[in-house]
Image: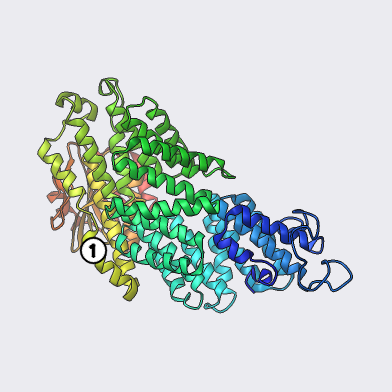
Amino acid sequence: MRPLEPLDRVSPLPRLLRSAPAGEVRAEIERVEALLGRGGEPGTGGEPGTGGEPGSGGAPLPGGGEPGTGDAPLPGVALLAAALGFARGALALREGALDAAVLHLDGAAAAFGRQGEVEGRELARCEAALARLRRDGRSACAAAVEELDAIAAAGAPGRRAAVVAGHYRGAAERLLGDAAAAQRTLLSALRRSEPFLDERAQILNSLGTLYVTLGAHGAAEALLEHAAELHRRRGDAVGEAIACGQLGAAALGLGALERARAPLQRQEWLCARLGDAFGRARALTFLSDLALELGRADDALALATSARDVAARAAPPLRTWMAYAARAIGRARRDLGDAGAAAALDEAGEIFRELGHPLGAALAAWDRASAGALAPGELRSGRAPGDWFSAAWALGSLGLPARVAQLLRERLEIDEGVPRAEAETERGAPAPDGETRERALAAAAQTAPHVAVQREVELVYDRPEELAGIAARRAAAHRNLGRLAALTLAPPGLVVAAVAAPRLGARGIALPPERAAAACVADLPGIAVWIWPAATAPAAVARDLAELGAALGEPPRAALALAPAGRVLCPPFAGDAGAELEGVEVGALLALTGALAPGELRLDPRLGWDGDACASVEALGFLVTP
């Protein structure tokens, strides 16, 4: 039994939850609760009857007489009460009232369990796990995955509860940043969702969202257009709003700014009608960013202010969207020449850091650097250099080279209006010539996905596993390209490692993972070259090499040296053999690797690693030799 099924005979609540304004849904819940009187069970979403006196909300329930009285009591009153608790939880989840959602959905799961309704209990548990993921973020992921796996394993893999559990497990994996695992899980759930079109539409939403984050915007558009149509045919305005929001994001990723406007406006209208604070705050924030891209800072400021107000009024407040809205407010004020830009950007950065949100923190740091550089006399004020680089490095490490390209372009445009000597003072290093910087920008900007769009659309339906593998490999390559582009802003000094292992040179194994601090500048059969900023801690270098060893299935051999004047001048263009470097010599390092044993690290004395540093490296299983 599905959780809302007991209500089918007495109320339109299942339909209203998909399509009606929140106030209308709440009024209907209270009407049914009032008709139940005191015949329901406490603890399943509020005491039945608290919405009004029995009989005050409309016609009597089927069965004749009031529930709980002696004449013809309605069968299944306890199940009706459980269904009402689930309805309250679903409404709270829709509105972003996540504490209330967890409370009501947990209560509904317990109530269905007391009645022996296994499917209702399992589906309510799935929704409660989703509410916790939205409320608590990454800290809830491990417990959610454990619970969802238990639900999926409790019966046949093709039953509805197993499909929903798989769907939400994929959401948890995406939240953890494991895009490859999320793709596998969601694709598996999609294959098993054929009998359940409502769940299929929701999974298409999640899979499309994932492809947006991976930059596979063509595949995302195809999936999300399908999802939006399924939701419209079912009258599911909630699901359609989600699909429209991600369709707008996919269009933005393809550079189709005007095409993005209609789905984002549709999402905002639907969410305002539904009382969906999360979706409305998101849509308003995206529309504000779109207005900024189109040069309409005044419109952007009004939209972002509305977004912040909507996010702040939610219970609990939607702090992620408050931060994104504050960022948009700061950017709009910067473009309008308003001195309040810095305060809004600082507010956004502080919230992002508190939330542990690396993308938001990187974007806010970029905007703060931009706003500071544009402020009168800012370059002469003693502001510490490195703001641009740290923001660019964070964006590159997140696999967003297009964002790094935007940052490089903005920095180049600002520096063009500043005397060269002042620009070098602000950088803390000699400024590359204009032609070199233009090449670096062009290389970082080569990741526009337009050419691959049609092929993505074909693969997503015919061979989705192949698309998943391609998207994961492309995300790793984009992350490496973004880091190399960011390093063009770094002060001189690189740690360089020539790494040898038989399996190198195949299937992108040499591309550093998301949490690494390295960038790869060469990948050949049996050999790779990695670089790090000179200030990288020895333990971080060793951790990166240990992760490479885990991916290879054997410990690598590596010779490490310090290149004090080493710099990245330009990341590689498509077809290039590697990045354009200055002050880096790797020939001697490559020769050294042939004499090393597996797991041995040969260190250049100029690295200056002391005994404690070497001990921390050896603790990871390496043999350190001078």
Direction right: furthest residue: 70
- Left or right: where 232 falls relative to 36: left
> Which residue is found at the position 55% from the left and 77% from the top?
159
Viewer-nearest residue: 443 or 18: 18
Q: Is residue 358 visible?
A: no
Q: Is residue 593 visible?
A: yes
Q: Residue 36's image quarter?
A: bottom right
> Which residue is found at the position 72% from the left and 73% from the top?
116
Estimate the x, y position of residue 432 in percent, counting from the top left: 14, 35
Estimate the x, y position of residue 576 in percent, counting from the top left: 13, 55
Viewer-nearest residue: 179 or 621: 179
Q: Residues within 10 Å of mark 1 (few under 14, many from 20)?
A: few
Q: Amino acid at mark 1?
A: Ala
- The residue wearing badge 1 is 452
Specify how the rendered protein is coloured.
rainbow
Viewer-nearest residue: 581 or 479: 479
In the rendered image of this protein, does residue 545 appear above or below residue 503? above
Viewer-nearest residue: 351 or 30: 30
> Which residue is found at the position 44% from the left and 62% from the top?
206
Q: Where the C terminus falls, by quadrant?
A: top left
Q: Where the N terminus falls, by quadrant?
A: bottom right
Across the whole image, how many numbered discs are drawn on residues? 1
Estimate the x, y position of residue 507 in percent, counting from the top left: 25, 65
> Which residue is found at the position 62% from the left and 52% from the top?
23
- Left or right: where 567 falls relative to 295: left
Direction front: furthest residue: 59
Estimate the x, y position of residue 496 in percent, counting from the top left: 22, 46
Q: Secondary structure at mark 1?
A: helix
